[in-house]
Image (cartoon, rainbow, N blue to C red):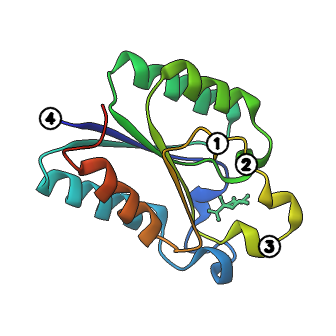
């Protein structure tokens, strides 16, 4: 059975209310619920985690390695553009991951164009809203996906 983990970074607990023009109207709970249903239908285990705290995200990734998680879907949110610590945690865990952004970070402020994750990611989905998570999950569920 595949063991999958979805991680969301700071302020994504506010989805639904937060800048809907960028991030849509779906709540994180609704997004996670849809992902859990799809994973269950496919016979995979899926855990979700959100934190506003960088160190907690690092700890959750270290925990994922101990739990033998096969694949991570991560939206590091603002930490995308700043966090060497979360990048290093993913590298240490050696768990393949897809980077997801609800908004198209390339259509926004220039500082959002740099990611500490993209060069290590299996793939990046940016600008497709909540569907980005769903597409990432479909990839992670593929039998051919490494891990
Ligand atoms: C985001 C884009 C980031 O630049 C921003 O800081 C976020 C959300 C997105 O999903 O579009 O918090 O990761």
Relative vertical location of residue 145 with respect to residue 66 in this rendering, above or below: below
Residue pointed to by mark 4: 1
Name the residue furthest bottom: 21
Q: Which mark is residue 27?
A: none
The alpha-carbon separation of the residues under discs 1 and 2 comes to 8 Å
Q: Are marks 4 and 1 in contact (CB under 8 Å)?
A: no
In the displayed structure image, the side of residue 52 where residue 65 appears, left or right: left
Secondary structure under tag 4 reads loop
User: Callout 2 environment at 10 Å: few (<14), some (14 to 19), or many (20+)?
Assistant: some
User: Callout 1 environment at 10 Å: few (<14), some (14 to 19), or many (20+)?
Assistant: few
The alpha-carbon separation of the residues under discs 2 and 4 comes to 31 Å
User: Tag 4 or tag 2, which sits nearer the N-term?
Assistant: 4
Secondary structure under tag 1 reads loop
| Quarter occupied by residue 66 | top left
Relative vertical location of residue 139 with respect to residue 91 in this rendering, above or below: below
Q: Are marks 4 and 3 in contact (CB under 8 Å)?
A: no
The alpha-carbon separation of the residues under discs 1 and 3 comes to 20 Å
Residue 92: horizontal and vertical position, in percent?
56, 18
- For label 2, being within 8 Å of ligand 1 is answered no
- For label 3, being within 8 Å of ligand 1 is answered yes
In the displayed structure image, the side of residue 80 where residue 5 appears, left or right: left
Residue 45: horizontal and vertical position, in percent?
22, 40
Q: Which mark is residue 108?
A: 3
Q: Which mark is residue 119?
A: 1
Residue pointed to by mark 2: 115
Q: Residue visible at 58% across and 25% down?
A: 91
User: Tag 3 or tag 2, which sits nearer the N-term?
Assistant: 3
Q: Residue visible at 71% across and 27% down?
A: 85
Residue 110: horizontal and vertical position, in percent?
87, 65
Name the residue furthest right: 110
Q: Are marks 1 and 2 in contact (CB under 8 Å)?
A: yes
Q: Nearer the viewer, residue 120 or 85?
A: 120
């Amino acid at each position: 059975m595949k063991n999958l983990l979805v991680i969301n970074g700071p302020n994504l607990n506010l989805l639904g209310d937060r800048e809907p023009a960028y991030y849509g109207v779906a709540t994180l709970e609704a997004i996670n619920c849809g992902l859990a249903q799809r994973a269950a239908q496919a016979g995979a285990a899926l855990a979700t985690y959100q934190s506003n705290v960088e160190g907690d995200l690092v700890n959750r990734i270290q925990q994922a390695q101990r739990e033998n998680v096969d694949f991570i879907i991560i939206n590091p949110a603002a930490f995308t553009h700043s966090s060497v610590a979360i990048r290093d945690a993913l590298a240490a865990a050696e768990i393949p991951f897809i980077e997801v952004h609800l908004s198209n970070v390339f259509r926004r402020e220039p500082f959002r164009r740099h990611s500490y994750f993209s060069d290590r990611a299996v793939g990046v989905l940016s600008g497709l809203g909540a569907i980005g998570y769903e597409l990432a999950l479909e990839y992670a569920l593929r039998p051919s996906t490494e891990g």
